[in-house]
Image (cartoon, rainbow, N blue to C red):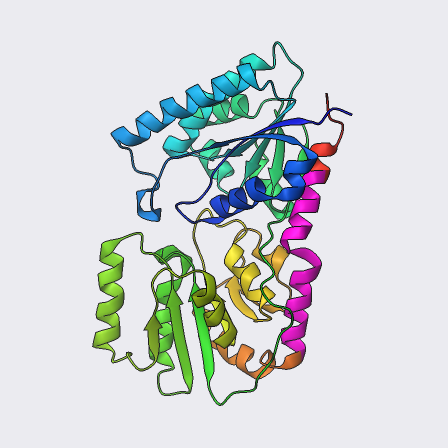
Amino acid sequence: MQKIKLLSILHRSPPAHGASKVGDFISSSQNINEEFDCYYITIKSSDTISDIGKISIKKIYLVIELYIKILWALISFRPNKIYFTASISGVAFYRDLVVSSLWKIYRLFKNVNIYYHYHTKGINNFVSSSERNLKLTSFFIKNVNLILLSPILFSDFNKIKSFDKVYYLPNGVENILNNIEFVKKDRVDILYLSNMIKSKGYFSVLELANKTKDRGIYYHFAGGWQDDDDKEEFFRYLEENDLSKKVVFYGFINGKEKSDLFKKSDIFMFPTRYKNEAFPLTILEALSYGIPIISTDEGSIPYILDNKSGIILNNLDNLENALNQAVNTLLNRETSIYCRDRYLNHFTLRKFEKNFLNIFKESHNV
């Protein structure tokens, strides 16, 4: 039987963010590459997190390059299915709108299934801001299949009815550990690990460190900076409040350094209010290490967590109370085992891979 010819147009690292990490896995997956006849095109736009959303001559060149690569793939590869990592707004949306014209024309000559994978939220805000945005987005997703991270995010598309089917594909992360070793300690180590974007909540955690500096609680921050002013403010706050003995900043880390930091942490804290927060991989990573989580009700976080694996806040004023609750009720072996099992049952890369294969094998056209 002839293989499905799958053209995947997706983000890959760098920079390292949720969509690029997922793209890295898809393109390197042996099972996906064996099941389908695959052709990959990388969406290149930003070299670092701080470059995201900014316009430059280089980015205009990259849009032209992307357009030419897709055109050539459609002519030479002639895919049966097209997988595309879609953007919701801004310059990236208009780039996507331009390149989508290629497969809209292509499907006039060949029966092809098109899938837009959304790694973020915010469609509803974008289409609600103007009638033009609503019409353009409706045209962009007309007769395509949507891949969303969880059912919670479907409400983001309430004002748009032009798509075909909707599939749900929860993210997964690598299984680093063979098992967990819960060790009762005399101190509590709190971890914030994500991009150092203020709306993701790192400064709320830093302020909490100041409130609790007389207790046996220590704070670890890791991630790349998006804004130099935020970086200066962070370290100025450390100095002004004499937090050098309670707070450690590691910068962007990966590999063994990141794994070691997860292993030494007792609670993962991610009080995000980032407007496009959809399905943070860093929470999945914490679960994989058996770490209970304090986070918010943004995006799919209530889908990822339950009251046995963490505390979900709807008000950041309750962050200190949540910490006290976590220290009193979640720092035990039973909770660690439950967090680890929740990850193994729902959020491994193998689960993601299986779900991905099932979506693209359904009712295919060869």
Q: Is residue 306 magenta?
A: no
Q: Is residue 346 magenta?
A: yes
Q: Position of residue 184 (x, y in %)?
A: 56, 87
For the N terminus, the quadrant is: top right
Is residue 67 visible in the rendered structure shown here?
yes
Task: Give the image quarter of residue 233.
Answer: bottom left
Q: Position of residue 112 (x, y in %)?
A: 65, 20
For the C terminus, the quadrant is: top right
Q: Nearer the viewer, residue 215 or 56?
A: 56
Is residue 101 visible in the rendered structure shown here?
no
Residue ID at (57%, 71%): 292
Residue ID at (51%, 44%): 24
Q: Is residue 299 left or right of residue 89?
A: right
Q: Which residues are magenta?
A: 334-357
Q: Position of residue 295 (x, y in %)?
A: 51, 64
Residue ID at (73%, 22%): 365
Q: Nearer the viewer, residue 204 or 336?
A: 336
Total marks shown come to 0
